[in-house]
Amino acid sequence: MVDSSSQALVDELNTKRKRLRLWPFVAALTVGAFVLSAKQLPPWALLTLLIIGGLLIAVTYYWDLLRKTTVMLYDIESEFAGVVEQLHTAFDGVRSCRATWHLQAQGKVHDRKYHAGASHLVTRSSIALGLQNPPFVKTNVATPSIPVGRQTLYFFPDKVLVFEANGVGAVSYENLRIDISTTNFIEDGAVPKDSEIVSRTWKFVNKKGGPDRRFKNNRELPVVRYEEVQFSSNTGLLERIQISCVGRTSSLAQAIGRIGRAKGERQ
């Protein structure tokens, strides 16, 4: 999942991420030397050994950070700064929604009466949108981030970096597609305060859609209107999130589109 324009940066990020941390080995050697010398050296010598070992661990830890960190500094031109600011403003609007989920999987329901009348079952997990840098990346700009399962999307001014455990990918804004839709979701958990309840159903329904009287504790469930956003690209990105408040993500899609167009005009 790499655009050709970002290949050099992605290669650098992946190379540095694979570099072995040295400080744990120094720490293990220090502890081992202390244990082996505990009965042979006087207290002052053991204290000296601990101090030297501690200094070596600190120096090696800092050296590891330098070896593994990639610096990404941006000098954003004035005509482009407004577009980036629109992205951050739109992201803050989405981030202010009470609940956000990553949609992990979706399957068709064959017997709807046992699933509150739903036509599909959705596996989702609660996520938190944030402003944070990727691991081992130092930058001078705030970075909107969206965790999507094993991956996290980081929205930099010129590209989206996709971080996961086994590597880093990149998607240009020109190739990033956002599709927005609304869905009526049968909610069996707490309903966020900024969501709209459009109707109600029951955990077990009969053929007519009413409550199935054969089941005890057949509780009523709210049907809530949520917004869903799909991020995709021609390089392989395909992730969906669900948001409790409807109408916020259109500004985000427009801001991303403006960045893509602005970058295209500058090339």
Image (cartoon, rainbow, N blue to C red):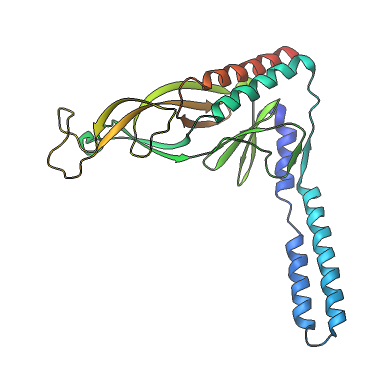
Q: Report if residue 267 is visible in the image.
A: no
Q: Is residue 167 left or right of residue 114?
A: right
Q: Which of the 4 image quarters holds residue 73?
A: top right
Residue 17 position (above or below residue 43): above
Residue 124: image quadrant is top left
Viewport quadrant of the N terminus: top right
Q: Residue 194 appears at what percent x and percent y? A: 44, 28
From this view, report whether residue 101 is shown above or below residue 250: below
Residue at x 78% of width, y 87% of height: 39
The spot of residue 265 in percent (x, y) is 72, 12
Residue extending farthest top: 265
Q: Is residue 29 left or right of residue 201?
A: right
Report the residue that reaches farthest toward the front. Answer: 193
User: Is residue 123 toward the left or the right of residue 39 in the image?
Assistant: left
Q: Residue furthest left?
A: 214
Q: Is residue 105 above or below residue 4?
A: below
* Residue 118 visible somewhere in the drawing: yes
Residue ID at (51%, 39%): 127
Q: Which quarter of the rendered picture does the C terminus lie within?
A: top right
* 250 lies above or below 230: above
Residue beneath the point at 60% across and 27% down: 92
Residue 72: image quadrant is top right
Residue 252 x %, y %: 57, 21
